[in-house]
Image (cartoon, rainbow, N blue to C red):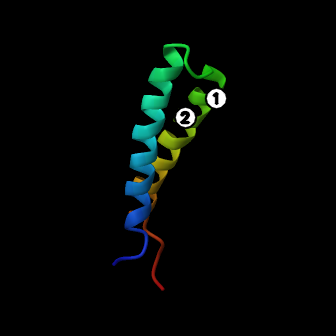
């Protein structure tokens, strides 16, 4: 398996889970001060992991 292939999809699953937790937070079942930062961090890590592996790192 290629190095760094599994991590973006793991973050994608984390984003989906945190989205559903945020829905529960909007229904006042879980505090929003816990779910909103979790959703932000998971979206940030997902976007970063999908875009960072296509960066040109120069000739080695």
Q: Quadrant of residue 8?
A: bottom left
Residue drawn at 57 percent across, 27 percent down = 36
Circle 1 crowding by C-alpha within 10 Å: few under 14, some 14–19, many from 20:
few
Residue lying furthest front in this view? Answer: 29
Q: Residues at badges 1 and 2 in contact (C-beta under 8 Å)? A: no
What distance separates the C-alpha of mark 1 from that of mark 2?
11 Å
Seen at 63% across and 21% down, the residue is 31
Q: Which residue is mark 2?
A: 40
Outermost right residue: 33
* Residue sitting at x 44%, y 39%: 17
Question: Which numbered disc, 1 or 2, marks the residue closer to the eye?
Answer: 1
Q: Viewer-proximal residue, 29 or 5?
A: 29
Q: Which residue is mark 1?
A: 34
Which element is circle 2 on? helix
* Residue 3 image position (x, y, % from top left): 42, 75
Q: Position of residue 4 (x, y in %)?
A: 43, 69
Of the pair 26 and 9, the residue shown nearer to us? 26
Q: Look at 33% across and 78% down and name the residue there.
A: 1
- How crowded pointer 2 is (Cα within 10 Å; few <14, some 14-19, many 20+) is rated as some
**At which x and y percent is residue 40?**
55, 34
Side (left or right) of 28 relative to 4: right
């Amino acid at each position: 398996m290629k190095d760094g292939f599994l991590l973006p999809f793991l973050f994608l699953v984390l984003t989906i889970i945190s989205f559903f937790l945020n829905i529960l937070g909007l229904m006042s079942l879980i505090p929003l001060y816990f779910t909103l930062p979790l959703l932000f961090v998971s979206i940030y890590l997902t976007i970063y992991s999908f875009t960072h592996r296509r960066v040109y790192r120069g000739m080695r």
